[in-house]
Image (cartoon, grey):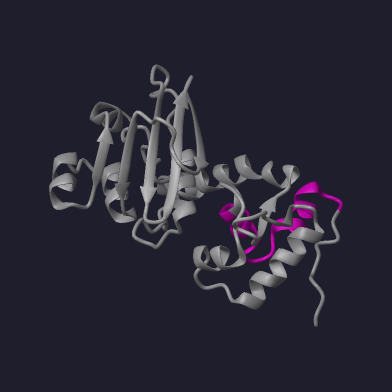
Amino acid sequence: MVGRRKYDDGCAVAHGLDLVGERWALLVVRELLLGPKRFTDLIAGLPGISPDMLTQRLRELTDAGVLRRRRLGPPAAAWVYELTRWGAELEPIVLRLARWSSRSPGMRPDAPLSTDSLVLSLKALFDGTAAADLRAALALRLGDDQFVLRIADGQLAIARGEPHQPDALLDTDQATLLALLRTDRPLDEALASGELRLLGSRDVVEKVRRLFPPPAPVPLADRS
């Protein structure tokens, strides 16, 4: 098998690309930012990657110290991959890259997203200034995936898992959630159609949905 090509450059940027610059590597990191996943979960979140390619990337990232493999105890008793503490430090880099690239005129808002990618995009687009006076916990259920969004002091924290006394719970699908975040679609319309189930404070939901404005595309003049 042909060995990996390296930049053989003393620049730290080049070395960083040696670590996570191979195709799919940074997307594997993205899929693990919200917590551990099994191999099958990673395959589901990365449509287009082959099992062999994913195995290779997981091996390389493990060898580099970015992630590790761990066996969960009963009742799960499954092997999962998770970021190391050092690997988790890639989060602000991934989010900043997402925010930067979302300003590209070539960005396709209709392209498919993994669930984790959608949820992480909330962190990338979060407007902390607009949320300065808001303190809230919002539970989000997207199919089999559950997350808790906590907003306080102009900061947003997102964790995977069951909610504990959230101010509101949204149970919906990706398309409906994106429509509520990206457009002025009324909550009543989504509720009446059955595409959305809302428990708790409607006022909190209305405030939270306004905190993720898409950045304006880069003007043509600024790209020349």
Q: Confirm whether residue 216 shows in the render.
A: no
Q: Confirm whether residue 95 shows in the render.
A: yes
In this figure, what is the number of numbered marks? 0
Position of residue 113 in the picture relative to residue 183 (left or right): right
Which residue occupies 46% across, 30% down? Answer: 150
Q: Position of residue 182 (x, y in %)?
A: 30, 44
Q: Quadrant of residue 165?
A: top left
Q: Residue furthest front?
A: 75
Q: Residue furthest bottom?
A: 1
Which residue occupies 48% across, 39% down? Answer: 123
Q: Position of residue 80 (x, y in %)?
A: 65, 59
Q: Quadrant of residue 143?
A: bottom left
Q: Quadrant of residue 207?
A: top left
Answer above or below: position of 155 versus 120: above
Decide whether the magenta segment is chiefly helix, strand or loop: helix
Closer to the camera, 74 or 200?
Answer: 74
Work out which quarter of the rendered image holds the N terminus and state it. bottom right
Whether 26 is among the magenta residues is: yes
Q: Position of residue 170 (x, y in %)?
A: 31, 42
Q: Position of residue 59 (x, y in %)?
A: 75, 66
Residue numbers of the magenta segment: 10-31
Which residue occupies 27% across, 36% down? Answer: 199
Whether 145 is among the magenta residues is: no
Closer to the camera, 141 or 88?
Answer: 141
